[in-house]
Image (cartoon, coloured by chain):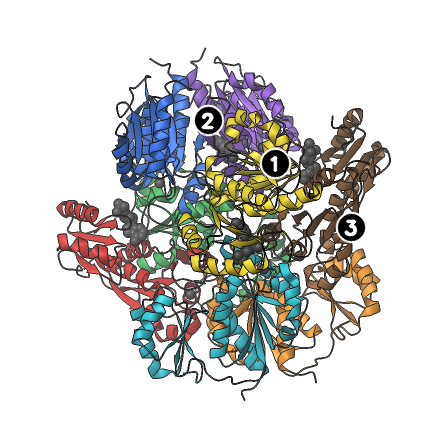
Chain colours: A yellow, B brown, C cyan, D orange, E red, F green, G purple, H blue
Amino acid sequence: QRIGFPEVIYGEGKSAEQLVLIAQRMKERSDKLLVTRVDADKAAAVVAQAPELSYHPDAQALTGFGQALPPVVREGYVAVVCAGTSDMRIAQEAALTLEMMGSRVERIHDVGVAGIHRLFARLDVIRGADVVIAIAGMEGALPSVLGGLIAKPLIAVPTSVGYGTGLNGLIALGAMLNSCAPGVTVVNIDNGFGAAYAASNIHKSIRSER
Amino acid sequence: QRIGFPEVIYGEGKSAEQLVLIAQRMKERSDKLLVTRVDADKAAAVVAQAPELSYHPDAQALTGFGQALPPVVREGYVAVVCAGTSDMRIAQEAALTLEMMGSRVERIHDVGVAGIHRLFARLDVIRGADVVIAIAGMEGALPSVLGGLIAKPLIAVPTSVGYGTGLNGLIALGAMLNSCAPGVTVVNIDNGFGAAYAASNIHKSIRSER
Amino acid sequence: QRIGFPEVIYGEGKSAEQLVLIAQRMKERSDKLLVTRVDADKAAAVVAQAPELSYHPDAQALTGFGQALPPVVREGYVAVVCAGTSDMRIAQEAALTLEMMGSRVERIHDVGVAGIHRLFARLDVIRGADVVIAIAGMEGALPSVLGGLIAKPLIAVPTSVGYGTGLNGLIALGAMLNSCAPGVTVVNIDNGFGAAYAASNIHKSIRSER
Amino acid sequence: QRIGFPEVIYGEGKSAEQLVLIAQRMKERSDKLLVTRVDADKAAAVVAQAPELSYHPDAQALTGFGQALPPVVREGYVAVVCAGTSDMRIAQEAALTLEMMGSRVERIHDVGVAGIHRLFARLDVIRGADVVIAIAGMEGALPSVLGGLIAKPLIAVPTSVGYGTGLNGLIALGAMLNSCAPGVTVVNIDNGFGAAYAASNIHKSIRSER
Amino acid sequence: QRIGFPEVIYGEGKSAEQLVLIAQRMKERSDKLLVTRVDADKAAAVVAQAPELSYHPDAQALTGFGQALPPVVREGYVAVVCAGTSDMRIAQEAALTLEMMGSRVERIHDVGVAGIHRLFARLDVIRGADVVIAIAGMEGALPSVLGGLIAKPLIAVPTSVGYGTGLNGLIALGAMLNSCAPGVTVVNIDNGFGAAYAASNIHKSIRSER
Amino acid sequence: QRIGFPEVIYGEGKSAEQLVLIAQRMKERSDKLLVTRVDADKAAAVVAQAPELSYHPDAQALTGFGQALPPVVREGYVAVVCAGTSDMRIAQEAALTLEMMGSRVERIHDVGVAGIHRLFARLDVIRGADVVIAIAGMEGALPSVLGGLIAKPLIAVPTSVGYGTGLNGLIALGAMLNSCAPGVTVVNIDNGFGAAYAASNIHKSIRSER
Amino acid sequence: QRIGFPEVIYGEGKSAEQLVLIAQRMKERSDKLLVTRVDADKAAAVVAQAPELSYHPDAQALTGFGQALPPVVREGYVAVVCAGTSDMRIAQEAALTLEMMGSRVERIHDVGVAGIHRLFARLDVIRGADVVIAIAGMEGALPSVLGGLIAKPLIAVPTSVGYGTGLNGLIALGAMLNSCAPGVTVVNIDNGFGAAYAASNIHKSIRSER
Amino acid sequence: QRIGFPEVIYGEGKSAEQLVLIAQRMKERSDKLLVTRVDADKAAAVVAQAPELSYHPDAQALTGFGQALPPVVREGYVAVVCAGTSDMRIAQEAALTLEMMGSRVERIHDVGVAGIHRLFARLDVIRGADVVIAIAGMEGALPSVLGGLIAKPLIAVPTSVGYGTGLNGLIALGAMLNSCAPGVTVVNIDNGFGAAYAASNIHKSIRSER
Ligand SMILES: Nc1ncnc2c1ncn2[C@@H]1O[C@H](COP(=O)(O)O)[C@@H](O)[C@H]1O
Ligand SMILES: Nc1ncnc2c1ncn2[C@@H]1O[C@H](COP(=O)(O)O)[C@@H](O)[C@H]1O
Ligand SMILES: Nc1ncnc2c1ncn2[C@@H]1O[C@H](COP(=O)(O)O)[C@@H](O)[C@H]1O
Ligand SMILES: Nc1ncnc2c1ncn2[C@@H]1O[C@H](COP(=O)(O)O)[C@@H](O)[C@H]1O
Ligand SMILES: [Mg+2]
Ligand SMILES: [Mg+2]
Ligand SMILES: [Mg+2]
Ligand SMILES: [Mg+2]
Ligand SMILES: [Mg+2]
Ligand SMILES: [Mg+2]
Ligand SMILES: [Mg+2]
Ligand SMILES: [Mg+2]
């Protein structure tokens, strides 16, 4: 019913058969589909039966129905910043979700706080964004550092990935909620989709459709 | 240094003497001050020595230095919605912080999910806002219900207040992070100030200063 | 010994062989059997050897020994309401348990609080019930909303299913225990059977056998 | 609006002045009032200004406005069973709430599971009830033992009181949720009011008003 | 070095090959061996190479080197009491450990508190014991009830088995530590071996070797 | 009814008036009374009205009714070993409880594992005991070290006292339950009384009354 | 016995009288004393009776017996770095402990990660230290950022102070243990003394006494 | 860029193919590589394609590129002490990391506190070290005992391995943080690499390169 907005399926725990069926049903009432949390094997089985879907291995997601990605529909961009290479699947899920909703995305990867010069090297492109998503696991410090450097809407995503014992992301989550930088808001652990959805709500409010 | 932006002091654990001293120092470099978490007794002692500060008992906060509140500087408004009467102190802290940052605020109180007709009665004013802050304790369900009814940026604040055993707000926090409504972002327990700061960042991005 | 009451077996962790043996022993002293938590593969192996049992795939349960379900023995009905499609296995377990105990059941599915109009569309049938079971995962908000809309005995079941990080149902459990709607009682996570057993105790007290 | 139903105030954290004001406002729209969680000192201050309220020290609650308690309006009774003397405040809160809602109550105190003969001595009166509320702290075992002995609706209340380190009632709560007796439903820690409200909902369904 | 005392190996996480090697090394310096936590498959592989070991499937343990069990060497007996059938593996581990240490054991199974008449039916044999081990999962109530009925040394073992969500035994552990029956001591979750070792220490102190 | 056995009152949370009343009632049916957890001020108020009670400030307990302590009634002794000076109140509670039950006690204080030579200096008297109680806070390591040095029944008591952040004794409790020395049994945090009660049960079984 | 090493008393929970007594006893066998965790009122009462002790209000500690601080006895220095003004008490406790052990200290305060330029401004003095102690509350990010900038021994201290809900320091503790900067070691929450003791052990190993 | 310092890869969750690729890339810019957390099967697949790497099965790690281990480059040694045989993988990871960084290592295994004579037998070699790493699971008591016996820098590593229920190492971690021996610093659970990295930082500061 919301024209131009993608239908979204959470793929985890659903079989390839179930996903094909749901996709077929969706096709009747929407022209854009996003299926998150689909590993490569399941994706291959789905695409074999539903070739109008495209797989994005980095984001572990399927999109459809026309071209792999819809066109950008508004000015400006969202920066998706992530601390470590192991956080990249979540970052790609966030970036792809934003692109499905018509926002342009700048991806800034591997700028964790223990190598802070890498973060400074990319600060201009982060400061140029309309909204920033900061993704980090382990001690989850990236949003605190970023929050002190920029004055834009900033959404933090804690991740369960990475090495060490972070109680599956609870430590990163707690650190982000306790950030000494004011104005950081937080979504659930590994919830790249949710952060992107919120960022898209803000981006849409800032920039009118073109 | 950030012109027009208030200096903010966290009043909890600071004595009246300390607050007076800090306020005097601040006065030299800023024309706007916000002191949060000040109870009525401490506020009286502070205002006795620093009469250029005004006390807001509902928000348990002091403001200064000129008139009690600065003028509104941008179009539109932020809706501050709260579930129960016991959540009102946090709601007033959020509202006052927004007003100190130049945003107009609509206060919508006592619209908890167990009396959902009261929420529906106020839905138009909520839908008209540029940004919505939803504040709830106990089971923290208000943002989930609101998230399904509006398509605006929505920030959730869990509170530690209310009756029953909510692990001092941890249950409300967990519920908001696990909301089935996509796009809800969350701040720390009782952090009305932080939610307002984030909302102000968004509001500023949407509306240019007038 | 309790005539007409089903024997109940918890199937999880028991092999097909063990279940067949137990079923044979039960058959001597009871005419009704319910085996919960049996997946499709194990069920097939059991039914191959014990064809007097029927499998209910939605509820992941086996029943016996005569027809698949006993007749309804009392007036009125119990409403089994569930928030999301992923909560349906627990809802079906509750519904089947109630039917095995002689109660009629109305199933109301997919009425989560983020799409509250779907809940309102089914409110009449919920209000007509003698007892209501409300099942939800994630933030577990459904019983709070329902509790404000009906004045009937209401039992809440938190589930561990659904997307996001709900600490395996602990957040939904905590939210239901802290519901701002008075009169909600709660059973353990995923305990559809227990909720149905309690609901049946209440339904029996309200309606005499016919 | 719900005729004959008491207005209920949660007294904790409200001053005597606030309670007097609320009581006066309530008096205009209701003929029955229950204020829970009021200690003796605060109660004295309230009653001095609002002599139409009666204090019940065992339940730490105030009632009004006419006689101290309304008449019993339905057949049968609810049994309020409690394990230890330190659980008695919660038991009295539950009993008084039920009486305010028009149910007759049988109080069975000090029948903890470590002295099980005392429980057996009172079993007949428990079995004669329409609904049973079982209240226990520490290891919270009472509902499990009772659940095996009776076939009536049974609501368990964990308490934070008693000696030893029970994590403020979390252990008793967890034990009750994990009861090996099927059909036990549970309310929040120390929530005698909530258990009584749920029991009253059931009692009303079983017995028509007389 | 402690003559007549069995060597004990914790089998979990050790391969069949490792167990055979350790057993051979042990044989040189001890005449009694107990290997706990060995499933049927691994046991078969071990016994094929070390036929002087006997497997006890109920206890999931291997013993050696001579006959399957050593003779009883002291008067009196230890009662091993367990609440549910799913607690039986732990109970058998405790019983076998005691027998390897020369104590006679009375096994009392399936006497959970929700069917308390079964416990009373076996009370005489429990009261006749020198030491009692009480094993229970879920709400862990058995030691509290037993503690009120007997005046003998009583050791409680919480188990992680059983149905429902008991936080892997943490609830049963907490309940036993908070028992309202004084004098209950507790070992770690599923630690049948440790309870038996402690019980054996007590039994040896009470009865001289015969 | 149990002749010669003291009546025991848990003093925490009871007023001096309540304690005097209970003591008077107890005097009619028992000749020995133990009241634990009574601070010096409350004790003075009680003794003023009930001079037949004696206060033991180290154990924060009152005893009665005849002489301050009953005679020793069995051979052998119980060793009460404690790690730090801040654990001493719990150690004295345990020792006094044992003396009230007729056992002789050897007190061994300040033998924490970070100064292990002090423990070795007292090892002979510990080894001579019939039962050993080991009390420690912080990391709770004392029972593990002791368990490797003695072969007697050994009961561990975690304490909430001491410096540092031990989660109010939960760390010491967890450490004792996970002791690598087999045969350690554990009671609740700060439960000196419970450990003594269990030790007395064992001591009575070992030594006949003289 | 360790010549030149201070005796250390943990002052919390000890009365002024007890502290005076312990100080007098210590004076006989040591020439240096450190008493931590003493607030201003208690310190005044102690110094009134033991004027050879000096109070350090910032560190909330007393030292003795000769001059307020002993001379520096080794080359180099330890940097004590702290994130916020509310962490300063812990920082001063650490610095004073180091000075009592003969190390020179550089204090670097208020260099939290949300204002990272302040940290960079002090980096040279931090890099010149032999050992670094990093103290932070809230999200505890300071050691991660520092760990990426220096290659010296680095000890992290989480604090319970600061605004927001950090579970009394557990979040900062968890963040520091999960630091993505390798080589960070951690002490308990608020344990400035312990960090200084460890730093002193390292400093002594690096620099011979002069 | 840091000459002579090994590149380090965390192997867990990376495929053999990924590891081969990363190793090839590393070879261009470094002459030393350490890959931790590689099991035997994956190691075999990697070495088949990258024969310049050597596998160390005890440490579950790969090293390269020249000889299996670089030469020792400084005086003195680090002692790696571990409590149980099941902690040995972590101990070997720590030891190998130190050797890759040019330190000599003394390995002292199986000296848990329940057999304290084994620890005393090795005390001289421990006391001779420049830095000590103490590794223990279960109750984690080893660092407390060691901390009372030596005056050298001491780093504690809690492990998740071993028998019993230690909450995956959280109990050992908590015990080490609460050690009554001052000066113990702690790293994350199973973090042998991190402890070695910190120990190497200290060892380098104490001894100049030779
Ligand atoms: N990766 C994701 N993480 C969290 N929530 C998601 C994700 N993908 C989809 N969702 C949510 O799941 C809903 C669809 O769930 P389902 O009906 O089970 O496919 C969507 O409307 C989203 O709210
Ligand atoms: N009510 C509040 N809740 C949470 N954080 C606050 C609050 N008020 C102020 N703060 C934060 O505290 C900082 C000032 O702390 P301080 O320097 O201790 O006064 C501000 O910059 C805000 O980031
Ligand atoms: N089932 C069991 N549960 C807990 N601990 C056990 C068990 N079986 C053996 N142990 C302990 O494990 C030790 C042997 O461990 P290991 O040297 O790894 O074989 C014994 O001395 C016992 O303390
Ligand atoms: N501020 C502190 N934080 C943590 N531990 C401390 C502190 N001050 C002293 N201690 C420890 O407490 C011991 C003295 O404790 P006590 O005998 O109770 O005075 C010292 O040896 C230190 O190990
Ligand atoms: Mg990070
Ligand atoms: Mg709410
Ligand atoms: Mg829900
Ligand atoms: Mg109880
Ligand atoms: Mg049980
Ligand atoms: Mg200790
Ligand atoms: Mg910080
Ligand atoms: Mg150990």
Relative depth, front residue between C116 and B156 = C116
Residue at label 2?
G198
Real-space Cα distance between discs 3 and 2? 53 Å
Mark 2 on the same chain as mark 1: yes
Real-space Cα distance between discs 3 and 1? 32 Å
One can see residue A143 in this view: yes
Q: Nearer the viewer, mark 3 or mark 1?
A: 3
Residue at label 3?
B107
Crowdedness near tag 1: few (<14), some (14–19) or many (≥20) residues, C-alpha within 10 Å: many
The chain to which mark 2 is attached is G
Residue F123 in the figure: left or right of residue D95: left
Residue C96 in the figure: left or right of residue B205: left
SS at circle 3: strand
Q: Is residue A10 above or below residue G45?
A: below
Q: Is residue B90 above or below residue G208?
A: below
Farthest residue, direction top: G210
Return the x and y of residue E57 as percentages of the image width and height.
Answer: 24, 62
Amino acid type indicated by mark 2: Ala
Of callouts 2 and 1, the N-terminal one: 1
Crowdedness near tag 2: few (<14), some (14–19) or many (≥20) residues, C-alpha within 10 Å: many
Q: Nearer the viewer, mark 3 or mark 2?
A: 3
Mark 3 on the same chain as mark 1: no
Amino acid type indicated by mark 1: Val
The chain to which mark 1 is attached is G
As drawn, the label of residue G161 is 1
Q: Give residue C7's quadrant in the image.
A: bottom left
Amino acid type indicated by mark 3: Arg
